[in-house]
Amino acid sequence: MIYISGKITGDENYIQKFAKAEKKLNELGYLSLNPARECMKLGITDNYDDCMVYCLGALEKCDAIYMLTDWESSNGANIELLASKKLDLEIIYE
């Protein structure tokens, strides 16, 4: 499973951006995890800390991480990338 990582905070279009990446990865035959959608389903989108706890736990269940082009400007995505390196996940850049 591929975890999608990118900027959420301060990006009004993050839901569409993550959905587009999820669709692209699924069309390529990958099973993807869209944390933007999952945090919405859990009702924790307004709490950064709760989202990050969920996201890092979800990341542990994945084999790879897909870094959206804006990842460098996101504190959360940078944390997810560091965690992915520690977990020895495959890192794929958009």
Image (cartoon, grey):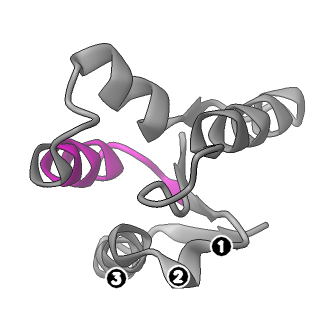
Q: Nearer the viewer, residue 92 or 22?
A: 22
Give the mark, 3 or 1, whose residue is nearer the N terminus.
Answer: 1
**Mark 2 and mark 3 residues within 8 Å of each other at the beta carbon:** no
User: Residue 58, which numbered label?
Assistant: none
Structural distance between the alpha carbons of marks 3 and 1: 16 Å
Q: Quick one: which residue is furthest to the top in this view?
A: 41
* Residue 77, magenta (yes or no): no
Q: What element does badge 2 sit on?
A: helix
The residue that appears at 32% across and 30% down in the rendered structure is 39
Residue that mark 1 sits on: 70
Give x and y (percent) for residue 20. 78, 36
Quadrant of image for the C terminus: bottom right
Horizontally, residue 85 falls left or right of residue 56, namely right
The residue carrying pointer 2 sits among few (fewer than 14), some (14 to 19) or many (20 or more) residues within 10 Å by Cα, namely few
Number of numbered discs on residues: 3
The residue carrying pointer 1 sits among few (fewer than 14), some (14 to 19) or many (20 or more) residues within 10 Å by Cα, namely few
**Mark 2 and mark 1 residues within 8 Å of each other at the beta carbon:** yes
Disc 2 marks which amino acid? Ser
Disc 1 marks which amino acid? Asp
Residue that mark 3 sits on: 82
Q: What element does badge 1 sit on?
A: loop
Quadrant of image for the N terminus: top right
The residue carrying pointer 3 sits among few (fewer than 14), some (14 to 19) or many (20 or more) residues within 10 Å by Cα, namely few
Structural distance between the alpha carbons of marks 2 and 1: 6 Å
Residue that mark 2 sits on: 73
What span is in magenta?
Answer: 51-64
Give x and y (percent) for residue 88. 40, 75
